[in-house]
Amino acid sequence: MIKNLLLTAVRNFRKDKWYSLLNVLGLTIGITFSLFLIFYVADELSYDSHQQHADRLYRINTYIHEKDKNTNWALSQLPLGPQVKKDYPEVEEMVRFTSRERTLFKSGENSFYETKVYYADSTIFNVFTHKFLEGNARSALQAPFDVVLTKSVAEKYFGKNTSAVGKTLKSVYDNYRVTGVIEDLPRNAHIRYDMLISLSTALGNFQNGPYAWGNFDNYTYVLLKPGASPQAFNKKLGEVYTKFVEPIFKQFNISMRYDVQKITDIHLHSQLEREPEEVGSMSYIWTFSAVAFFMLLIACINYMNLTTARSARRAKEIGMRKVAGSNRQQLVLQFLGESLFTALVSVVLSMVLMMVLLKVFNSLSGKEFTLGTLLQPFNLLLLLFVALFTGLAGGSYPALYLSGFNPIGILKGSLSKASGNVALRRTLVVLQFTVSMSMLICTWVVYSQLSYLRKKDLGFNKAQVMTVTVNTGQDERGKIFSMNNDFRSLPGIKSVGAANGYPGSPNINLNLFTVETDNGSIDKAVECYAIDEHFFPTLGIKMVKGRNFSGLSDTLHSIVVNESMVKQFAWKEPLGKRIKFPGDTSSNYREVVGVFHDFNQKSLYNPIAPLLLFYGPNGNVTQLKMDAATIASSIPRVEAVWKKYFPQLPFEYKFLDDDFNSQYAADQKRGKIFAAFSILTIIITCLGLLGLTAFTTQQKQKEISIRRVMGASVPQVVTLITKNYLWLALISAAISFPVSWYFMSRWLQVFPYNEGLSAVPFVVSALVIVLTASATAMFYSTKAALTNPANNLRTE
């Protein structure tokens, strides 16, 4: 029986090649790109699942509350980990990570900047899962200046098939002994590192004593014992705050609490500042899951419409089979067999297409899927499930519909109109239109918002500004002073500024200050960094009151603040206001000498916060404002000056506009994915429309012929059929508009700065769907109207 079903399916597949091609094409596109989205979602959901102890591994986060401000950090204090390990028996082990600044390492002739470097406790290998290729996990990070490398980094410095353990890596001023090599971390880890240095190397650089509880500069993880309650442990952390932190913070009217977060929840559920890596979002998981489902559904709807559109050609075959003794169950099995065969062919073609497009999708999504990913057992089972789902879901309705034809009526030449089925098919097309229109609207809004972010006035001029950073771990201000003077003498360099921060730079200091107000002094945490007198002119930042820094005379006492700080502290006259470090009883103070125009220090995901700038000449970050016409020729000259003062450091540079806009990279990637799948959804919908229009024109062939004989023109006939699809598109718009408005207005609330929703995306998206539907309907209706009426009426 199965053999006969298969032979019949193959025979019908080959009999009508054009129909089969449309069916396979629609299903292949839907299956291929649905699977891509499913793989994307599965990868996002799999973060940190490779950890052996993921079910009882938690990070301790910090939530700081001031009177009018909350600061939520993934960071915590250095003493926290050892303290909870000592005080609470449910803590099996703890580990701390402290990030190290971008550093140049060297071995022989090989030298590279490394950015993913952390100091870590030796207990890391008891908490996190790593496969050691060389060395011993128990002793790898015991001594100061021990370092563990990932496999790729070890090969980069020492070559392949060469043992790295026992060899030395050099930074500018220190030597590190390689004590272990581990497998590269998977990409689906919320914290990723290429090098781990023993924390004992850096402990001397951190503040000790009670005030160490006031510094938040490391990530703390705890491994709870089996059966321990994270909720109960979380409550106990309040005792740590009361005993060690409250005595420091209470005097400044600041409160704080700790909260544990399961490691597998961090990537998709964290909304904290200072995350070690870019995090995802559950909203995108739900969105992409819905898109994948609807693409499969639309592909199935297309199969239904294309199959029923062909019903007239199969009618006599069905009638003959029924007369010959076939029952309805046998016919249902036959049509389901054809559907499953078509789905299977589509799945095979989808695998081939996925292999071809894998690099393109990786580039679009930022993932690293390989051919091995497609061939994993789970994914092969997923392919089988998709084939079954598509075959059964797409074939069930045609099978029941076609098998229900009345053989007597068929053999007499009259095909049932099945009005109820017409209503169902139109409902399915409305669903297709609604999904397509909604995706178009959402894509338009996302791209419009991202374009707004790129073009919005940030309060500074980021165009043609190159930044170079000196990182040696030593005081290089003398060399930087001379280097910047040489930069200023180069042709094509308009101005040169220096600072230890810049717009868009991560990890700006947040310090506690005693701030003078019109009603006394208050203690408040304010972001701050140091700049020189050339920083503002180089970035085009305007002073709105007072003056800019003028030189070394501003070193000890002068500060400048932004407009937001003036508003924050309700200063009627900001000039002359003083700030001090809390607890400082000396006469040392800083005085406001100028107010500068607000600029976006962080991305436009964040509102502008109060900012305080000190005078600090020759900071390690140099900004060079360049002449746009001579950038290409200026870069080699800048490099030559760099090599004169820092020959041991590779010359690397960034442009401020690229660096600042990189903060939107995640949303831009997701926006591109959404746009690509919106276009594909429209393509699949068009294939479905071909099916429905073909069915309608077949049903109305004789009516059209009679109208043509009675004098109706081709445009009149085309209008008669096309207007039905216009109504379907309008119904879809009535559904799509409020749904899209609701979800996109909520999405825009994430941005403190947004241009809101306008009618343009809704109107244009509706027009695209209407024009697409009209063009498709006009194609078939015109073809039907031009057919010789005699061919359709000769049997009447």
Image: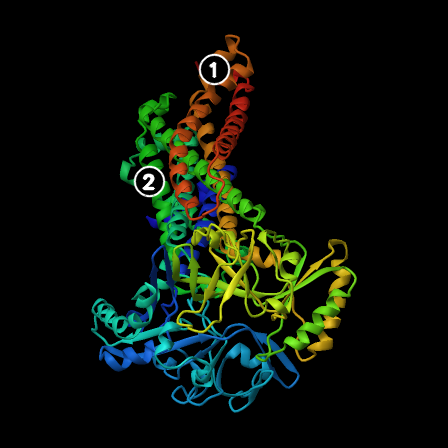
Which residue type carries mark 2? Answer: Ser
Q: Which of 3 and 27 is in front in this view?
A: 27
Q: Position of residue 357 (x, y in %)?
A: 54, 55
- Side of 652 relative to 182 (left or right): right
Q: Residue 8: in sight, yes or no? A: no
Which residue type carries mark 1? Answer: Leu
Q: Which of 271 and 278 is in front in this view?
A: 271
Secondary element at image label 1: helix
Q: How many labels does the image show?
A: 2
The residue that appears at 55% across and 53% down in the rendered structure is: 599
**Mark 1 sits on what residue?**
793
Secondary element at image label 2: helix
Q: Where is residue 278 in the image (x, y as percent from the top left)?
A: 46, 61
The residue that appears at 45% across and 79% down in the rendered structure is: 119
Residue furthest out toward the bottom: 166
**Mark 2 sits on what residue?**
396
Point out the tag, 1 or 2, that comes first from the N-terminus.
2
Q: Position of residue 790 (x, y in %)?
A: 52, 15
Residue furthest out toward the front: 587
Residue furthest out toward the right: 491
Between marks 1 and 2 in the image, the one whose residue lies nearer the viewer: 2
Placement of 540 over or under 327, stated as above or below: below
Q: Residues within 10 Å of mark 2 (few under 14, many from 20)?
A: some
Asked whether the beta carbons under mark 1 and mark 2 sit within 8 Å of each other, the answer is: no
> Where the C terminus falls, by quadrant?
top left
Q: Nearer the viewer, residue 46 or 589?
A: 589
Placement of 355 over or under 581, stated as above or below: above
- Side of 321 relative to 727 (left or right): left
